[in-house]
Image (spheres, rainbow, N blue to C red):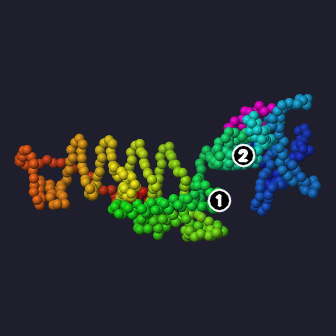
Amino acid sequence: STSGSQEVHADALGRIRVRFHFQHAAGGAAAQDSAWLRVAQRYAGPGVGSQFLPRIGQEVLVGFLEGDIDRPVVLGALYNGKGEAGVPATPGGTRAEADTGLYAQAGDGRPSAQGNLAGGHAPAWHGAGGGADNHRNATALWGVQSREWGGTGHSRLVFDDSDQQLRLQLATTQAATQLTLGHLIHQADNYRGSFRGEGFELRTDAWGAVRATAGLWLSSYARSSGPAGEATQPSALLSQLQTLGKTFSQAAGTHQTVTLAAHAGVGQPNHSHLIAEQAPLQALLTSVKTTVPGTAYAEAKGAAAERSARPGDDRVPHTGDALLGLAAPAGIGVVAGQGLSWSVGETLTLASGQGSEAAIAGDARLHSGQAIGVLAAAVDGGQTQANSLSLVSGEGALDVQAQSDEVRVQAKEGLKLVSANAEVELAAGKTLHLAVAGGASITIEGGNITFACPGTITVHASRKSFVGPVQQAYPLPQFPRSSCKSCILDAARQGTPGVLV
């Protein structure tokens, strides 16, 4: 009999002892057990096979090799219990309706009718019939269910063959961890509960991890056939990304602003950590388009480093590097209840074929260790905009500073400085110079004002007044010392995670 957590009585060879019915002792005499018996398995070999050992208290079926009583073998285990419901009492042999009241007490998270009215062991799934009063189980559940030593937990593999509701579940009560495929429902032991969805669910109340050291694709693109690593649609999107990056990087160079490192290269032209001879976008596309021999794993693993896109009937698509890819035809949503962090060691490229927006309820901050380039209207979009680039402060001041160099405001056409309700102030620590292409200028320097023109100076005023000298100091801003540029450059050279724009 079981004692505490002792559930199995077996030796190192997987043999067990049994007690035949004729060995049960009468009165207070000690019961006698058999010798060690081998247990027949569905599959047995040198270091391989299946292993199911009957536990203490279970009934087993014993056979004898060649009919020899001295050569017993355990052939299997038998159910011998009487369930709690479904079988009506028949006093005196009279007929009675099936008693299903106990079945009706089951729910999505509450089993019922799993015990035994008499000693013995009833099966985990017994199938009373369709309908809520019969556990919605017409004997459609098959599989294996174990039981925790000294406890009530279990692990199970369930095949549900209900018509049009096929389901496969691998589950354990440890942290409610389970993988369910097909028709998703709640299951409480024998009870088939309410509908939960179609497809698959992998869930746990503990922690989870998915690891693929050679690369992993998560895709919602439909593929009825083809290799598992096929990434035709993601490759097409990456090709569009590369074209978009090339177009706007060249436009940035034409308009004399910062080019895109993802297209031009990091640290040097056409260089990335992924592939030393290619810029990041091209390197990513090259890795995604890799194919490897499909004949042997070792050969395929060695060929992946070549990043060859060579076609062939014996080749299958797989990434050339350990990439993680997310691809979806309709869109990808990333939502966090609190923070969302992105950290990269080289480049971070965000691109869209149409619009991109960032709506921020609080503060928005953009910090760069090197340059920040902003370019608008780089290509003709076919739409007329009043302002191609708008920088607006709805409330409060708009502060633009160059703390270690000059600020340039340049325009091909007009340049307007307008104050609707106050002053326009221009101040300089040394010289304030206004000039036009014709040669006329006004220079304010130190305590002097110099008017210069190759033509005529015309003054229109109803009254002219020239008085003695007056000096009025104007407060100029005090800028902080520059940040540690060498620290930032060292971090960039060493590949320390950060975002370089």
For residue 298, what is the image quadrant? bottom right
Looking at the rendered structure, the kind of residue marked 1 is Ser
Few, some or many C-alpha atoms within 10 Å of disc 1 (few <14, some 14-19, many ≥20)?
A: few
Q: Compare residues 177 and 453 and report the one nearer the observer.
A: 453
Q: Is residue 2 magenta?
A: no
Looking at the rendered structure, the kind of residue marked 2 is Gln
Would residue 286 be visible to someone looking at this image?
yes
User: Is 28 situated left or right of 261 in this image?
Assistant: right
For residue 254, what is the image quadrant? bottom left
Magenta stretch, residue numbers: 99-115
The residue at the point 33 percent across, 42 percent down is 394
Few, some or many C-alpha atoms within 10 Å of disc 2 (few <14, some 14-19, many ≥20)?
A: few
User: Is 274 situated left or right of 98 in this image?
Assistant: left
Q: Compare residues 452 and 4 and report the one nearer the observer.
A: 452
> Where residue 416 sits in the image (x, y, percent)?
25, 50
The residue at the point 32 percent across, 41 percent down is 395
Disc 2 to disc 1, how far (Cα)?
Answer: 23 Å
> Where residue 247 sits in the image (x, y, percent)?
42, 62
Residue pointed to by mark 2 = 164
The residue at the point 77 percent across, 56 percent down is 50
Residue pointed to by mark 1 = 225
Q: Earlier in the sequence, mark 2 or mark 1?
A: 2
Q: Is residue 271 above or below residue 14?
A: below
> Where residue 7 sits in the image (x, y, percent)?
76, 46
- Mainly helix, strand or loop, the magenta region? loop
Q: Secondary structure at mark 2?
A: loop
User: Is 112 situated left or right of 340 in this image?
Assistant: right
2 and 1 marks in contact (CB < 8 Å): no
For residue 148, what is the image quadrant? top right
Q: Is residue 105 magenta?
A: yes
